[in-house]
Image (cartoon, rainbow, N blue to C red):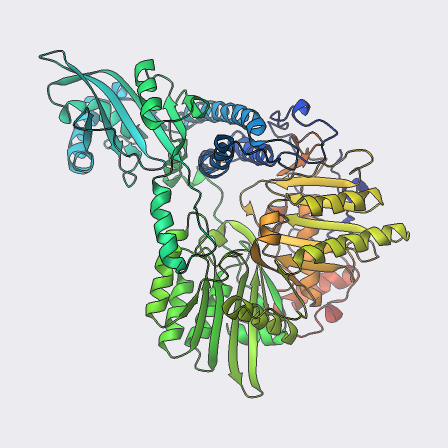
Amino acid sequence: MTTDPTDTAANVTVRALPGIAVGAEAETPANDKDKSAPSADNPPEIKFLNRELSWLRFNMRVLAEAKNDAQPLLERVRFLSISASNLEEFFMVRIAGLNDMVVRGMEGLSEDGQTAAQQIGPILKLVRKMMEDQQDCWQDLTIQLEKENVALVTARDLTPIEKKWLETYFFANIFPTLTPIAIDPAHPFPFLPNKSLTAIYTLEDTASAARMTAMVLLPAKLPRYVRLSGNPAARFISLEEVLDLFLPSFFPGHQAVESGFFQVLRDSELAVTDDAEDLMSHYEKALKSRKRGHVIGLILDKRMPATLRKFLTSSLRVLTRNVFQVDSVVGLSDIREFCALERPELKYKPYVPRYPERVNDFNDDVFAAVRAKDFIVHHPYESFDVVMDFLQQAAADDNVVSIKQTLYRTSVNSPVVRALIEAAESGKSVTAVVELRARFDEEANIKLARDLERAGVQVIYGIINLKTHAKVALVTRREPEGLRTYAHFGTGNYNPVTARVYTDLSLLTCDVDMCQDAARLFNYLTGYARPEKFNNLVMAPLDMRHAILDLIEAEAKNAEAGKPAQIWAKMNSLVDPDITDALYAASQKGVKIDLVVRGICCLRPGVKGMSENIRVKSIVGRFLEHSRIFCFANGEEMPNEVARIFIASADWMVRNLDNRVEVMVELKNETVREQVLDQIMVANLLDDTQSWELQSDGSYTRVKPSGKVMGAQDYFMKYPSYSGRGSAEHNPRLAAAKKSKKFNPKTDRKPRASKSAANKDKQGA
């Protein structure tokens, strides 16, 4: 496939963003073929790709960035760490679920027609291949790090000065935290926490030659890699090497005749019943149970002797197929510690998000800016501070009567939570819908719920059998004309930390219909008041599935009628079989479909007679692609002014559409629509620097730039968004550039050819 921006195969015209294909001549990236998916695993008669294999291929794309020489060296280390962390979670959730189905003898079939027993073999085979690639990648990265004076050394490499310094450091900072554990009839095999790293030894008494087995568990709070002092170069030694060096301190009179190092991964799914009387206490009990989940993965140092390996597999009762031996580093995700090095030349150039000029025009009063016109904030390119300011100004404003907000994932010591507490303590009516079932954030959410309740916030846990995943805030304010409501709809969480690295959209509006919809949503969440209708909002599980299917069907009917018919959509995952079937049917009727799916995609594109009009790409780069955008042409070639454009909290997955409370909101404001369709979606579809294209057999091929490169993430870092410009949109230099049609993409934002500046912003600057 060609990726020249003028190629109509991409189903996108370049008129919306002329000048974006700028930059140096492209070099073909390394690792441009994902060889993880032999077509034999995906026979052509199967309509759907396997979900688990699709996720593993996404993680292979993350790993490919760790191998990509175009990335800064420490960023490559970060990508490798992320791929290792992702794989740990995959074990704890997905493999755990499949393993449980196998043990129970469940015969249910996946969408690609396989039982759990049939899936587990190919999945674990690919997992082993990925682990080997990760270890090889780390070996390569350590060589390159050493060239940059960053070295990971062994005990044998220590200089006398380093060894003396390490001894002092060890007894002051490590020795007091460690507990040596002998294993015998008086000391049974200990409980090992999930993701724990442990050294195991066969020790021999130097006097009697008697042998025993012993362990030392590494505390999770200790740094895995100790930076040595007394050397201008950055020299590190791993904690397991330190343990081996000072082992006699723990077991005097013994010597190690065998040793090894391993990690335990446990089943981390929560068993939660739908009829729990007290959801908070029920979750607290479930969390305690999860910590003792059965071992689903045992990762071993390949040098571990067979005797110790057999002892561990027997003691932990782990299936042989779930035992993995690695060449180099057990617990590879810990290499993220190297990324803390102060070596800016080995990292991405710092990027400071822009603050929307529109808010500055109103003396930083977010409410005044929203009253003038709706606008979209594009994170992380535009600062999440504007969302925080919206909430903090609401908390401090005496005219604000009430605040309602959903909370799914947020940061430690969250400023969002502090704002809600401040608002409640100042006498405002504050309601927080806290989702306790946000995986791996359950304990944090229990704590923040208690903090909110102590401050007088009305805390609701949503609907017991539905996970509340919608991201909505609603503020009611007393104004001269009467009460006015303001709403925030987001595609991502209220988390200022992840907002710096996740691409998401925040819509700020005081549109009456949208705010009434948000109020009805909260009434449903807090009082089961099922809304009879929404004006502009689509909600799962009530009607989102049907709405999406209807929108796809409308495009299919346009194609049958000979009208232009296109669908552009961006999401994290596409798994739902009904949506996939509808896309297949639309493709067969001539609808041109372009999908940007970062992670799992079970749809098979490019299959003759089924999906030849569907193109799927995945963008993996500096920022995690997270926004959900759905665009339907509505009878004209895209991009156009009548397309139906939605942003959403939901992916196209069964869990999102049937088992969660999700929100999809249609964009009505002209410049907001233009920003999302003509700028964000066009740039994503034209990206040819960080994109991978999904093949019909399930493999991915890195898109090769043709001529000048186009990187969507680079573009958004360089050019301001449309709807947030405010008066900056009308500065004399830019206006003159538009009038003369002499547009310099390096210094000016591209004007939309079909609109004048005055008409574009008709709702006010």
Q: Quadrant of residue 7?
A: top right
Q: Quadrant of the C terminus?
A: bottom right
**From where the camera sits, is residue 564 visible?**
no
Name the spot of residue 84 as percent of width and height, x first.
45, 33
Residue at horizontal 76 percent and vertical 52 percent from the top: 552
Name the spot of residue 564 as percent of width and height, x first.
85, 52
Q: Residue furthest bottom?
A: 480
Name the spot of residue 671 as percent of width and height, x first.
69, 65
Is 312 displayed left or right of 74 in the figure? left
Name the spot of residue 161 as percent of width and height, x first.
19, 26
- Total labels drawn: 0
Q: Quadrant of the N terminus?
A: top right
Say above or below: 482 vs 370.
Answer: below
Q: Residue furthest right?
A: 562
Query: Between residues 465 and 500, which one lies in front from this camera angle?
Result: 465
Is 719 displayed left or right of 638 in the figure? left
Query: Between residues 98 and 668, which one lies in front from this camera angle?
Result: 98
Residue at horizontal 19 percent and vertical 22 percent from the top: 160
Residue at horizontal 77 percent and vertical 33 percent from the top: 607
Say above or below: 137 vs 532.
Answer: above
**From where the camera sits, is residue 58 visible?**
yes
Q: Residue furthest left?
A: 207
Say above or below: 301 vs 487.
Answer: above
Q: Quadrant of residue 70?
A: top right
Query: Between residues 551 and 529, which one lies in front from this camera angle?
Result: 529
Is 564 displayed left or right of 57 in the figure? right
Is 485 displayed left or right of 328 in the figure? right
